[in-house]
Amino acid sequence: MRRRTLGKGLSELISGEALPQSHAIIDVPLDSITPNPQQPRQHMDEAAMEELTLSIETHGVLQPLIVRSAAEGYELVAGERRWRAARRAGLASVPCVVHTLSDSDSLQIALIENLQRQDLDPVEAARGYRRLMSDFGLTQDQVSKYIGKSRSAIANTLRLLDLPAHILNSVQEGAISEGHARALLPLSQHPDRQQALFQRALADSLTVRDVERLARELLEEPQPAPEQAPEPAAPEPMRPDPNLLDVQERLQGALATKVTVRPNPKGGGRIELTYSDEYELERLVELLSLLA
Protein backbone atom coordinates (compact mmCIF):
# COMPACT_ATOMS: atom_id res chain seq x y z
CA MET A 1 0.00 0.00 0.00
CA ARG A 2 1.30 3.42 -0.93
CA ARG A 3 1.81 5.63 2.08
CA ARG A 4 0.28 9.08 2.24
CA THR A 5 2.72 11.95 2.47
CA LEU A 6 2.38 15.41 3.90
CA GLY A 7 0.40 17.55 1.48
CA LYS A 8 2.05 20.50 -0.22
CA GLY A 9 1.73 23.67 1.79
CA LEU A 10 0.27 22.04 4.90
CA SER A 11 3.08 23.17 7.17
CA GLU A 12 2.62 26.76 5.97
CA LEU A 13 -1.14 26.45 6.44
CA ILE A 14 -0.70 25.30 10.05
CA SER A 15 1.74 28.09 10.87
CA GLY A 16 -0.55 30.65 9.28
CA GLU A 17 1.95 31.82 6.65
CA ALA A 18 -0.37 30.83 3.78
CA LEU A 19 -3.59 32.25 5.21
CA PRO A 20 -3.51 35.91 4.13
CA GLN A 21 -2.66 35.04 0.54
CA SER A 22 -5.21 32.25 0.04
CA HIS A 23 -8.25 32.54 2.32
CA ALA A 24 -10.08 35.31 4.14
CA ILE A 25 -10.73 35.15 7.86
CA ILE A 26 -14.46 34.98 8.61
CA ASP A 27 -16.49 34.83 11.81
CA VAL A 28 -18.24 31.47 12.19
CA PRO A 29 -20.91 30.81 14.86
CA LEU A 30 -19.60 28.35 17.47
CA ASP A 31 -22.76 26.26 17.16
CA SER A 32 -21.96 25.71 13.46
CA ILE A 33 -18.60 24.05 14.25
CA THR A 34 -18.32 20.38 15.17
CA PRO A 35 -15.09 18.95 16.63
CA ASN A 36 -12.77 16.83 14.54
CA PRO A 37 -13.76 13.15 15.05
CA GLN A 38 -10.12 12.19 14.40
CA GLN A 39 -8.75 14.62 17.00
CA PRO A 40 -5.43 13.03 18.01
CA ARG A 41 -5.22 14.82 21.35
CA GLN A 42 -6.86 12.88 24.17
CA HIS A 43 -5.83 14.86 27.27
CA MET A 44 -6.21 18.60 27.86
CA ASP A 45 -4.78 20.14 30.99
CA GLU A 46 -7.58 21.77 32.95
CA ALA A 47 -5.40 24.55 34.40
CA ALA A 48 -4.06 25.44 30.96
CA MET A 49 -7.61 25.48 29.56
CA GLU A 50 -8.70 27.85 32.32
CA GLU A 51 -5.81 30.20 31.53
CA LEU A 52 -6.72 30.18 27.83
CA THR A 53 -10.37 30.85 28.66
CA LEU A 54 -9.41 33.89 30.76
CA SER A 55 -7.16 35.15 27.96
CA ILE A 56 -9.96 34.80 25.39
CA GLU A 57 -12.39 36.58 27.72
CA THR A 58 -9.93 39.49 27.88
CA HIS A 59 -8.44 39.61 24.40
CA GLY A 60 -10.67 37.42 22.23
CA VAL A 61 -9.42 34.69 19.88
CA LEU A 62 -6.22 36.10 18.37
CA GLN A 63 -5.35 33.17 16.09
CA PRO A 64 -8.06 31.95 13.71
CA LEU A 65 -9.26 28.35 13.78
CA ILE A 66 -8.92 26.17 10.68
CA VAL A 67 -12.15 24.52 9.55
CA ARG A 68 -13.49 22.72 6.50
CA SER A 69 -17.00 22.50 5.12
CA ALA A 70 -19.14 19.66 6.49
CA ALA A 71 -22.59 18.29 5.68
CA GLU A 72 -23.96 20.71 8.25
CA GLY A 73 -21.85 23.76 8.98
CA TYR A 74 -18.12 23.27 9.50
CA GLU A 75 -15.77 20.65 10.91
CA LEU A 76 -12.86 21.75 13.07
CA VAL A 77 -9.41 20.92 11.66
CA ALA A 78 -7.04 22.76 14.00
CA GLY A 79 -7.67 24.83 17.12
CA GLU A 80 -9.81 22.63 19.36
CA ARG A 81 -8.43 24.19 22.55
CA ARG A 82 -9.37 27.67 21.30
CA TRP A 83 -12.82 26.37 20.26
CA ARG A 84 -13.44 24.85 23.70
CA ALA A 85 -12.12 27.91 25.54
CA ALA A 86 -14.28 30.22 23.40
CA ARG A 87 -17.36 28.20 24.36
CA ARG A 88 -16.40 28.49 28.03
CA ALA A 89 -15.86 32.23 27.62
CA GLY A 90 -19.38 32.56 26.22
CA LEU A 91 -18.40 33.76 22.72
CA ALA A 92 -21.02 33.44 20.01
CA SER A 93 -18.55 33.17 17.11
CA VAL A 94 -14.84 32.72 16.43
CA PRO A 95 -12.55 33.80 13.57
CA CYS A 96 -11.94 30.93 11.14
CA VAL A 97 -10.27 30.14 7.85
CA VAL A 98 -12.21 27.68 5.69
CA HIS A 99 -10.14 25.22 3.64
CA THR A 100 -11.06 22.45 1.27
CA LEU A 101 -9.22 19.47 2.72
CA SER A 102 -9.32 15.70 2.39
CA ASP A 103 -9.68 13.48 5.45
CA SER A 104 -5.97 12.67 5.15
CA ASP A 105 -4.90 16.34 5.02
CA SER A 106 -7.25 17.20 7.88
CA LEU A 107 -5.75 14.51 10.09
CA GLN A 108 -2.20 15.56 9.26
CA ILE A 109 -2.90 19.17 10.11
CA ALA A 110 -4.55 18.19 13.41
CA LEU A 111 -1.59 16.01 14.31
CA ILE A 112 1.09 18.56 13.50
CA GLU A 113 -0.80 21.48 15.02
CA ASN A 114 -1.10 19.55 18.29
CA LEU A 115 2.50 18.35 18.22
CA GLN A 116 3.77 21.90 17.84
CA ARG A 117 2.17 22.91 21.14
CA GLN A 118 4.39 23.23 24.22
CA ASP A 119 1.87 21.79 26.69
CA LEU A 120 1.42 18.42 24.95
CA ASP A 121 2.36 15.57 27.29
CA PRO A 122 5.32 13.43 26.13
CA VAL A 123 3.29 10.24 25.69
CA GLU A 124 0.79 11.89 23.35
CA ALA A 125 3.70 13.51 21.52
CA ALA A 126 5.37 10.11 21.06
CA ARG A 127 2.14 8.59 19.75
CA GLY A 128 1.68 11.52 17.40
CA TYR A 129 5.22 11.17 16.01
CA ARG A 130 4.70 7.46 15.49
CA ARG A 131 1.41 8.07 13.71
CA LEU A 132 2.98 10.59 11.35
CA MET A 133 5.66 8.02 10.52
CA SER A 134 3.40 4.96 10.23
CA ASP A 135 0.33 6.54 8.57
CA PHE A 136 2.04 9.08 6.35
CA GLY A 137 5.48 7.59 5.79
CA LEU A 138 7.45 10.47 7.30
CA THR A 139 11.01 9.93 8.50
CA GLN A 140 12.28 11.16 11.86
CA ASP A 141 14.11 13.94 10.01
CA GLN A 142 10.86 15.08 8.34
CA VAL A 143 8.95 14.95 11.63
CA SER A 144 11.75 17.01 13.18
CA LYS A 145 11.39 19.62 10.44
CA TYR A 146 7.59 19.92 10.66
CA ILE A 147 7.43 19.93 14.46
CA GLY A 148 10.43 22.21 14.95
CA LYS A 149 12.36 19.93 17.31
CA SER A 150 15.71 18.21 16.92
CA ARG A 151 15.87 14.70 15.52
CA SER A 152 17.39 13.43 18.76
CA ALA A 153 14.46 14.89 20.72
CA ILE A 154 12.02 13.11 18.40
CA ALA A 155 13.93 9.81 18.75
CA ASN A 156 14.13 10.07 22.56
CA THR A 157 10.43 10.79 22.85
CA LEU A 158 9.56 7.84 20.57
CA ARG A 159 11.56 5.52 22.86
CA LEU A 160 9.01 6.12 25.62
CA LEU A 161 6.62 3.85 23.71
CA ASP A 162 8.87 0.90 24.64
CA LEU A 163 7.54 1.21 28.22
CA PRO A 164 4.50 -0.74 29.48
CA ALA A 165 1.11 0.95 29.24
CA HIS A 166 0.71 1.39 33.02
CA ILE A 167 4.00 3.33 33.23
CA LEU A 168 2.95 5.53 30.30
CA ASN A 169 -0.36 6.17 32.06
CA SER A 170 1.55 7.26 35.17
CA VAL A 171 3.50 9.78 33.07
CA GLN A 172 0.28 11.20 31.64
CA GLU A 173 -1.31 11.39 35.08
CA GLY A 174 1.74 13.16 36.50
CA ALA A 175 2.60 10.39 38.99
CA ILE A 176 6.11 10.21 37.51
CA SER A 177 7.93 12.57 35.16
CA GLU A 178 9.21 11.97 31.66
CA GLY A 179 12.71 11.88 33.19
CA HIS A 180 11.71 9.03 35.51
CA ALA A 181 10.25 7.14 32.55
CA ARG A 182 13.45 7.56 30.53
CA ALA A 183 15.49 6.28 33.49
CA LEU A 184 13.40 3.08 33.47
CA LEU A 185 14.01 2.40 29.77
CA PRO A 186 17.37 0.56 30.19
CA LEU A 187 15.48 -2.12 32.15
CA SER A 188 13.09 -2.91 29.28
CA GLN A 189 14.71 -6.33 28.83
CA HIS A 190 14.17 -7.05 32.55
CA PRO A 191 10.44 -6.38 33.13
CA ASP A 192 10.43 -7.69 36.72
CA ARG A 193 13.26 -5.37 37.75
CA GLN A 194 11.73 -2.47 35.84
CA GLN A 195 8.40 -2.94 37.60
CA ALA A 196 10.07 -3.19 41.01
CA LEU A 197 12.00 0.04 40.45
CA PHE A 198 8.89 1.79 39.11
CA GLN A 199 6.95 0.84 42.25
CA ARG A 200 9.83 2.00 44.45
CA ALA A 201 10.02 5.34 42.59
CA LEU A 202 6.33 5.89 43.35
CA ALA A 203 6.46 4.73 46.96
CA ASP A 204 9.66 6.55 47.97
CA SER A 205 9.31 9.65 45.74
CA LEU A 206 12.70 8.95 44.17
CA THR A 207 14.41 11.62 42.09
CA VAL A 208 15.31 11.00 38.45
CA ARG A 209 18.98 10.66 39.46
CA ASP A 210 18.02 8.05 42.07
CA VAL A 211 16.15 6.01 39.46
CA GLU A 212 19.06 6.29 36.99
CA ARG A 213 21.54 5.09 39.64
CA LEU A 214 19.35 2.20 40.79
CA ALA A 215 18.68 1.15 37.19
CA ARG A 216 22.44 0.92 36.58
CA GLU A 217 22.88 -1.15 39.74
CA LEU A 218 20.07 -3.50 38.73
CA LEU A 219 21.61 -3.98 35.30
CA GLU A 220 24.90 -4.99 36.92
CA GLU A 221 23.26 -7.65 39.11
CA PRO A 222 23.67 -11.20 37.78
CA GLN A 223 20.58 -12.77 36.35
CA PRO A 224 19.24 -15.62 38.52
CA ALA A 225 20.15 -18.97 37.06
CA PRO A 226 17.18 -20.74 35.53
CA GLU A 227 15.85 -23.58 37.61
CA GLN A 228 17.10 -26.89 36.30
CA ALA A 229 14.75 -29.76 35.96
CA PRO A 230 15.63 -32.61 38.32
CA GLU A 231 17.56 -35.37 36.68
CA PRO A 232 15.42 -38.42 35.98
CA ALA A 233 15.83 -41.20 38.48
CA ALA A 234 17.93 -44.11 37.33
CA PRO A 235 15.83 -47.09 36.34
CA GLU A 236 15.78 -49.87 38.87
CA PRO A 237 18.05 -52.75 37.88
CA MET A 238 16.27 -55.77 36.51
CA ARG A 239 16.18 -58.73 38.82
CA PRO A 240 18.11 -61.71 37.38
CA ASP A 241 16.06 -64.63 36.11
CA PRO A 242 16.58 -67.53 38.55
CA ASN A 243 16.49 -70.03 35.66
CA LEU A 244 19.31 -68.18 33.90
CA LEU A 245 21.29 -68.06 37.15
CA ASP A 246 20.95 -71.82 37.42
CA VAL A 247 22.19 -72.31 33.86
CA GLN A 248 25.06 -69.89 34.51
CA GLU A 249 26.16 -71.84 37.64
CA ARG A 250 25.97 -75.19 35.87
CA LEU A 251 28.14 -73.93 33.00
CA GLN A 252 30.68 -72.44 35.40
CA GLY A 253 30.89 -75.78 37.18
CA ALA A 254 31.31 -77.71 33.93
CA LEU A 255 33.87 -75.37 32.38
CA ALA A 256 35.69 -74.31 35.56
CA THR A 257 35.68 -70.64 34.61
CA LYS A 258 33.48 -67.60 34.99
CA VAL A 259 30.39 -67.72 32.73
CA THR A 260 27.92 -64.83 32.15
CA VAL A 261 24.59 -65.41 30.46
CA ARG A 262 23.22 -62.18 28.86
CA PRO A 263 19.62 -62.52 27.62
CA ASN A 264 18.22 -60.20 24.92
CA PRO A 265 14.84 -58.61 25.81
CA LYS A 266 13.64 -59.33 22.29
CA GLY A 267 14.65 -62.98 22.50
CA GLY A 268 17.85 -64.98 22.44
CA GLY A 269 21.06 -63.72 24.03
CA ARG A 270 24.72 -64.57 24.43
CA ILE A 271 27.05 -66.53 26.74
CA GLU A 272 30.36 -64.94 27.77
CA LEU A 273 33.34 -67.01 28.98
CA THR A 274 36.17 -65.39 30.93
CA TYR A 275 39.80 -66.61 30.75
CA SER A 276 42.90 -65.27 32.47
CA ASP A 277 45.64 -66.21 29.99
CA GLU A 278 46.34 -68.01 26.74
CA TYR A 279 46.74 -71.36 28.46
CA GLU A 280 43.26 -71.15 29.95
CA LEU A 281 41.93 -70.09 26.56
CA GLU A 282 43.47 -73.15 24.97
CA ARG A 283 41.93 -75.33 27.67
CA LEU A 284 38.49 -73.95 27.06
CA VAL A 285 38.83 -74.44 23.29
CA GLU A 286 39.78 -78.10 23.75
CA LEU A 287 36.97 -78.68 26.24
CA LEU A 288 34.35 -77.11 23.97
CA SER A 289 35.69 -79.13 21.02
CA LEU A 290 35.05 -82.36 22.91
CA LEU A 291 31.44 -81.24 23.55
CA ALA A 292 30.79 -80.46 19.90
Image (spheres, rainbow, N blue to C red):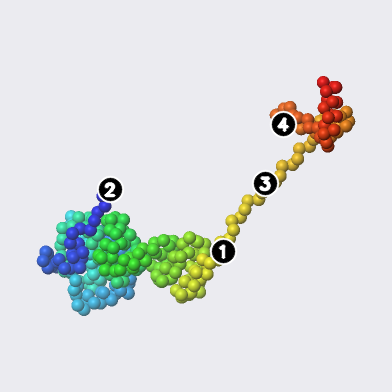
Which residue type carries mark 4?
Pro
Q: Secondary structure beneath disc 2?
A: loop
Question: Which residue is at a point 22% across and 75% down the rendered structure image?
Answer: 56
Q: Residue 1's mark? A: 2
Residue on which disc 4 sits: 265
* Mark 3 secondary-structure assignment: loop
Q: Residue furthest front?
A: 278
Q: Which residue is mark 3?
A: 232
Quarter location, residue 260: top right
If you read the primary sequence from the N terminus, does the residue marked by circle 1 or circle 2 appear first? 2
> Quick one: label 3 or label 2, which is nearer the N terminus?
2
Q: Are marks 2 and 4 in contact (CB under 8 Å)?
A: no
Q: From the top left corner, tell me how far across and down residue 225 is, in percent.
A: 59, 58
Answer with mark 1 or mark 4, whichever residue precedes in sequence: 1
Can you identify the residue that label 1 sits on? 222
Q: Earlier in the sequence, mark 2 or mark 4?
A: 2
